[in-house]
Amino acid sequence: MKGAVIFDLDGVIVSTDDCHYRAWQQLADEEGIYFDAEINQRLRGVSRMDSLEIILERADRNYTNEEKKVLADRKNAYYRELIQALTPDNILPGVGPILAGLKEHGIKIAVGSSSKNTPLILDRIGLKDYFDAVADGNDLSKSKPDPEVFLLAAERLGVPPEHCVVVEDADAGVEAALAAGMRVLGVGAAAANLRATLRADSLDGLTWADLSKLPTLE
Ligand code: BG6
Ligand code: MG
């Protein structure tokens, strides 16, 4: 049977990861909480509230649930202002040809993202109606590394998990894909993750045929 490829969004299809980083940095600075690039790495693929919990590990006081909600909303407002500037030019190199190649060869494509901003981002980059299915943070009760997002994407595609390949840039996403029983191509920050089935620095230069070498897509 024909398989499917499920793409993470942030850091795989579009480079919004720097916008997340800048928005969290602004919030942390305003709150006087230490934050740096290393801590930021731990936020990749992780939901907004779980990311906030990681940032608050360095806070010198406890925050109530109400305060946490206000902080998360503030970060999201900073982030949404930054992503308003996104256009189709921000689609990462290599993504367009791979998506087109997969479609042309009858392999279904989906987005599997922890982000509640997925609909806005897909709209901004001109890919709103391009995918066969989307599963995102608005649908989920558990964040990556839980497999929920990828299992839901596969269900919406009507393709069994063992016939799905995930493309991920986050270690949490690699674990989520493996836990879903899927193979995974690690790109970007996940190119160094030895748990990934395949690894590449980016999608640039890869073709749909490279992905189809994975037996799941045959
Ligand atoms: C993931 C990002 O895709 O989405 C994380 O890698 C982010 O950094 C998460 O925290 C949730 O995003 P949002 O847009 O719902 O705050
Ligand atoms: Mg990502």
Image (spheres, rainbow, N blue to C red):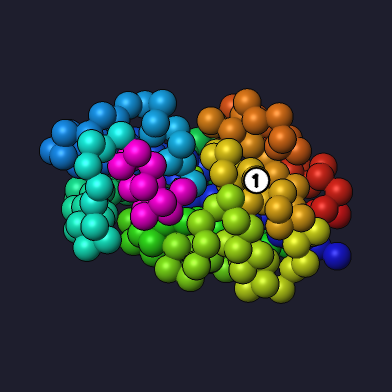
**Secondary structure of the magenta portion, mostly?**
helix
Dot 1 crowding, Cα within 10 Å, few <14, some 14–19, many 20+: many
Q: Let me know if residue 176 appears in the view.
A: yes
Residue 146 pos. (x, y %): 60, 56
**Residue beneath label 1, please?**
175
Q: Quadrant of residue 57?
A: top left
Residue 182 pos. (x, y %): 74, 53
Where does the N terminus fall, quadrant-wise?
bottom right
Secondary structure beneath label 1: helix
Answer left or right for 177 relative to 140: right
Where does the C terminus fall, quadrant-wise?
bottom right
Amino acid type of disc 1?
Glu
At 54% from the left edge and 40% from the top edge, which residue is drawn?
170
Q: Which residues are magenta?
A: 46-57
At 58% from the left edge and 46% from the top edge, which residue is drawn?
173
Answer left or right for 131 relative to 34: right
At 20% from the left edge and 48% from the top edge, which residue is drawn?
78
**Nearer-the-camera pick, 106 or 176:** 176
At 67% from the left edge and 51% from the top edge, which residue is drawn?
177
**Nearer-the-camera pick, 161 or 144:** 144
Q: Does the closest atom of ligand 2 sit within 8 Å of the Cβ of label 1?
A: no
Is residue 47 rendered magenta in the image?
yes
Q: Is residue 54 above or below residue 133?
A: above
